[in-house]
Structure formats: structure tokens, C-alpha cells
Amino acid sequence: MSVQRRRGQKARIWKTKTITDRRGNQVLLADGDGPHEVRAAFIPQRSSKAEVPGQQQINIVRMLVDPALNDVTLWSRVEFDGKQWDIVSPPAYHHGSRRTRHWSIDIRERP
């Protein structure tokens, strides 16, 4: 595990679970049973600051986490820096040496 992820910042992730709704459809949603504490490195990707009242501010951050993390999809949620974040792109697994392999997840701050 890299130094950034080992000593990185704490985040809480709600993993994804599948349930069956009343119509019999399989539905994915963030698991409400409880968040999982992880340490991660955060890299700012892009942001759009609101200049006029009523405009939306968009912050996108890339989160690098341990390769042992599973069941995280686009329907998962992240809490980081006291704010709620949505996952905006499917998690990408980067396989390298034991010390460098990781998941990278792009997250967007919720308005």
C-alpha cells in the first residue's frame, strides 16, 4: 500500500446492495446498514465554481483506495471532509505490484 493511502485521509463508504422492490425488480442502492471506514488519497480533478447566485458548484475528486475494497459501484455513497459525495464513474482497478495496486474512484460533491 502506498504511503499516501496508508497515511491518507479518512473516508466512509456505503457499499452497494441489491434488493427486490415490490414489483419484483432487482434494484441497486447504497447499503444503509452502515458505512465502511477507509483511508484514501484524494486528488482534485476539476471544479466549476458558481459565480452567480443560483448556479451550481461542481467539484470532482479522484479517490485512491485499497485494492481489497469490493461492492462499490455507481450507486454507492462516500462521506469525506464532512460532505456527502456521489460516485460519478465506475471504479477502475489498477493492478501493479503489491504496494501500488489500488482502486481509483471519481467522486462528485453533492449539492
Image (spheres, grey):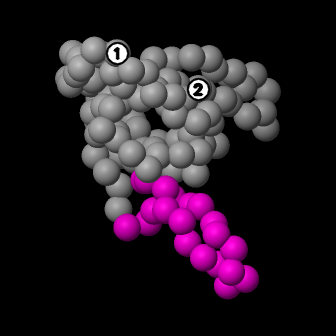
User: Can residue 56 be seen?
Assistant: yes
Which segment did they paint magenta?
A: 14-33
Mark 2 crowd level (few <14, some 14–19, many ≥20, 10 Å Cα): some
Which of the numbered marks, if any, corresponds to residue 96? 1
- The residue sitting at the bottom extreme is 22
| Horizontal arrangement in the rendering, residue 46 relative to residue 100 (left or right) | right
**Type of amino acid at the residue the image marks with label 1:** Gly
Residue at 28 percent across and 46 percent down: it is 37
Q: Is residue 90 magenta?
A: no
Q: Is residue 16 on the magenta stretch?
A: yes
Q: Is 26 drawn above or below residue 70 in the view shown?
A: below
Residue at the spot 73% in from the left edge and 34% down from the top edge: 56
Front position in the image: 57 or 52:
57
Q: Would residue 40 appear left or right of 26 to someone viewing this image?
A: left
Amino acid of disc 2 = Ile
Mark 2 highlights which residue?
Answer: 60
